[in-house]
Structure formats: C-alpha cells, structure tokens
Image (cartoon, grey):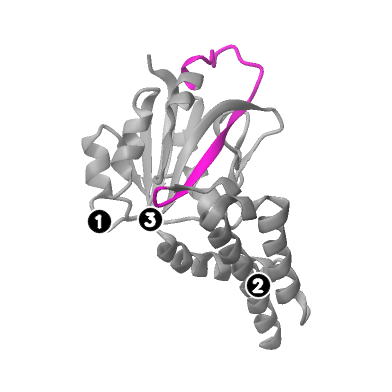
Amino acid sequence: MKADITATIITLNEEKNIKECILSLKEVCSEILVIDSLSSDKTCEIAEALGAKVIKQRYLGDGAQKAFGEPLAKNSWILSIDADERLDGDAKEAIKSLDLQNVDFDAFSFARKTYVGKNFIKLWYPDRVTRLYNREKCTYSTQSGHAKVQSSNTQALPAHILHYSYENYSQMILTSHKFITRGACIAYEDGKRASLFDPCLHGLGALFKALILKGGLLHGKDGLNVAIISAFSSYMKYALILEMQENE
C-alpha cells in the first residue's frame, strides 16, 4: 500500500536513469515530483509517461533545487532521491512498516550502496544519507555543493538505497574534474587558503585513509582504483586553491 509520501527527484538529462528510479518509488509513494533543470533529452517525457509530475526549474544548486520541490508536495513526508538511485527491496519494506502519522522522529536515513558499473564499492559503504523527512519539521540545507537534510531527530533504518553513480571508471575520472573544480572554488570563496605542501599532504592523507583506515587494500582493484582517484582529487583540490591564491 502506498503511503502519504511525496518523492522528489532532481534531474538534468537523466533519460538513462529516470525510468528505473521512478519504478522503484511507485510502490511506496503516492506522489512523484520531478524537478527538472531544463533537460534537453527525453527525461521529462519518460517521467510524465510513468505518472510523475514534472516541474521545470533552472538549476539553483543541489540543496536549493531539492528544497524547491518541498512546498509543491501534497504530502508532509518527502522522500528525496537522485535519478541515479533506487530503493532497494529492504527500503521499500522498511518504509511500508512506518506509521508516519505517529512516529517520534522527524527524518529517517538509509545506508547507500554505490556502484561503478556492476562493481559494488565497499570502500564507500555504508555512506548513510537522510532522505525521508517531514518537511514541516526539517528541510534540505541550501549551501553550495552537495547538501543534506538538516535534522537533529533522525532514525537510521536497516535499509538500503542503491546508487548507480558511474557507468565505469572512465566516467568517474571525467566527472571528478567537475567536483574537484567546484570543491576548490567553494573552499576558496569560504576563505580557505593552502600552503605549498597542502596538495601533497591532503593527497597522501586521502590515500592513507582510503587504503589503510577504511581497508581499501582488502577490496581488490575496486578499492585501489577508488583510493587513487580520491587521492588525486584531494591533491588537485588544494593545487587549484593554491593556483587561485597566486592569481589574487
């Protein structure tokens, strides 16, 4: 039985992902809103054909775009999910078991399983994310970069969201360029400054954390690949901050 939950999905050219995302939600959500950042592909047509309501809105930033959909929902409870994510079977069952009219929590979090292609990246697990929340009591932060639901009363559900983040490592490397640049710009604008040694220190620190502290060495080639890409990303973020300082 569908609960009084509105699913919100922010999209931009997600025709490859949107169908499976919506299908995973229909079993538990009575309303599905797609907040689309003016896609040029068939994202909107596919979403509407599956019964979702599409609202077009120029991209405001991750948190702001997700918060934009909240007042448009007919339900108080929001399930926010990205187009490249799906509810796992245990997440559907966990949501169905909730009596949202009589809960003591304002929000619920899920463990997230992230994949590169068909490879489950154990290094990033459990990567808990808060996605089911009462919009009358909490909301998405509107800060730059990846935002999160602001709630001090959250329960962790023993359930999963599946995250098909990258089709392959080549795509991961190409996408990392965007996150490196954005992360460096945000940090610099917030007043972050770097020393000559910071790129190496942070790069090596990220590599040590991924391989040793998080056990990436035990996760085979996937653990090694992700650790090296993470270390490179950390190195380049501080290298870019240093470059910005030199150009002041």
Mark nearer the N terminus (3 vs 2):
3
Residue 199 visible in this rendered orientation of the protein: yes
Q: Is residue 31 left or right of residue 133?
A: left
User: Disc 3 marks which residue?
Assistant: 167
Q: Residue at x 66, y 81 (%)?
A: 244
Marks 3 and 2 in Cβ contact (< 8 Å)? no
The mark found on residue 181 in the picture is: none
- Gap between marks 3 and 2 measured at Cα: 24 Å
x, y percent for residue 123: 60, 49
Residue name at image x 37 percent, y 14 percent = 1
Q: Which mark is residue 41?
A: 1
Q: Residues within 10 Å of mark 2 (few under 14, many from 20)?
A: many
Q: Nearer the viewer, mark 2 or mark 1?
A: 2
| Numbered range of the magenta stretch | 95-118
**Quadrant of the image for the C terminus?**
bottom right
> Closest to the observer: 226 or 218?
218
Q: Is residue 215 above or below residue 72?
A: below
Residue 82 x %, y %: 44, 44
Q: Residue furthest bottom?
A: 247
